Image (spheres, rainbow, N blue to C red):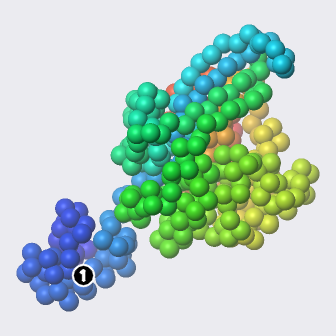
Amino acid sequence: MLKKELEVLALLRRNPYLSQQEMAEQLNLSRPSVANLISGLIRKGKIAGRAYVLPEEGVVVSIGGANVDRKFRLSQPVQMATSNPASASGSVGGVARNVAENLGRLGHPVKLLSIAGNDPEWRLIEEQSAPFMSLELTKALEGLATGTYTAVLQPDGELVLALADMAIYDSMTPEYIKRSEAVLMGASFLVADLNCPKETIGYIQRLAKARDIPLAVIPVSEPKMDRLGPDLSGISWLILNRGEAARYLGTPVETPDEWRAACEKLMEHGVQNIVITGGGDGVVAGNIEGIRHFAAHTVPAVVDVTGAGDAFSGGLIHAVMEKLPLKEIINAGLVNAAKTLQSELTVRSTLSAENLQKELEEIL
């Protein structure tokens, strides 16, 4: 870059809201000269947009849920309508938060954009999340209760029932998100879960499309699929399961042919890359270049299913950011999910970019 371009960038890093006239006066240049320098920096991708937002190299912004997860593991197979002996445990969770921790452990700078109550649950989330992500965009507000998720598990770790208190996320309106608009415009990658209201998801889609920022959308459950509108343009990666795909499309996604057809239909709605998971049946994924099936990785024994889906998404997004081919992208997700199924933790403590690479090399 030219010397004067570097001087303009230095000024903007100190104050992104400087006017062109103010910059001209500080640099002893004419305002038209500054305008030309700024136009050149925009073309070179050094300035990302309004208020001269400077892109943060490699930063991921993960938008959505940050909850406290409570798990009750049954001592015997569930018996309905009676008391069941169980052991209780708790941890921090939420799809956006879990994906953020996966990515943070994999070495990516991550900012979590969520909402919480000013309560002990938020302080627990803050304490356990801070080592892996920035929490500067998440606001703890009076009068609201931090989200909670309660899971009842069979002795083998399979989910029996889940209860979610997520009313707080109705307050993640476009106006709430726009307070962080400068950070969003400067991000290298955006992740959003469907804890966000429909209008907020639409706003994120439009921003990602306008700024050409990769966006991964991760549904939370089948009932929340109505938070996706018919136009899915702006979504670079849609990661969902067969039930969620069936709910959105209104058609069954059970046979292999129906599975592939669902991918094709979702791409017709504007998604660039589609990934539909099927548990032990593997994954069907693809884009305009083609659709293919990927087998699931064998797991000797499932310890806990909680967090496995988020681990899949985190591994996948990591591989996307590493610019790996589709086969390795999907396998990064599958390996991370398989290893997480064998851990009692929602995000496994052994996760790192180096370990994931070794695990991938073992199966590729």
Res 215 visible: no
Name the spot of residue 167 as percent of width and height, x first: 58, 43
Give left or right: position of 17 versus 152.
left
Q: Is residue 81 left or right of residue 307?
A: right
Horizontal and vertical percent for residue 292? 79, 57
Label 1 neighbour load within 10 Å: few <14, some 14-19, many 20+: some
Q: Is residue 59 left or right of residue 311?
A: left
Q: Position of residue 156 (x, y in %)?
A: 77, 20
Q: Position of residue 227 (x, y in %)?
A: 66, 57
Residue at point 14%, 77% (across, down): 22
Nearer-the-camera pick, 155 or 289: 155
* Amino acid carrying mark 1 in the image: Leu
State the quadrant of the C terminus.
Answer: top right
Q: Nearer the viewer, residue 360 or 345?
A: 345
Kindly indicate the quadrant of the structure image that contains residue 118.
top left
Residue at x-position 35% and y-position 77%: 42
- The image quarter containing residue 341 is top right
Number of numbered tags placed on the structure image:
1
From the viewer's side, name the closer residue of 65 and 327. 65
Q: Is residue 348 above or below residue 144?
A: above
- SS type, badge 1: helix
Q: Nearer the viewer, residue 85 or 266?
A: 85
* Residue that mark 1 sits on: 37
Query: Would residue 317 be found to the left or right of residue 270 on screen?
Result: left
Answer whether residue 167 is visible to the viewer in this image: yes
Above or below residue 291? Residue 19 is below
Report the residue at 80% width, 49% height from top. Answer: 242
Q: Quadrant of the N terminus?
A: bottom left
At x 74% / y 10%, what residue is drawn? 85
**Residue placed farthest to the front in the image?**
143
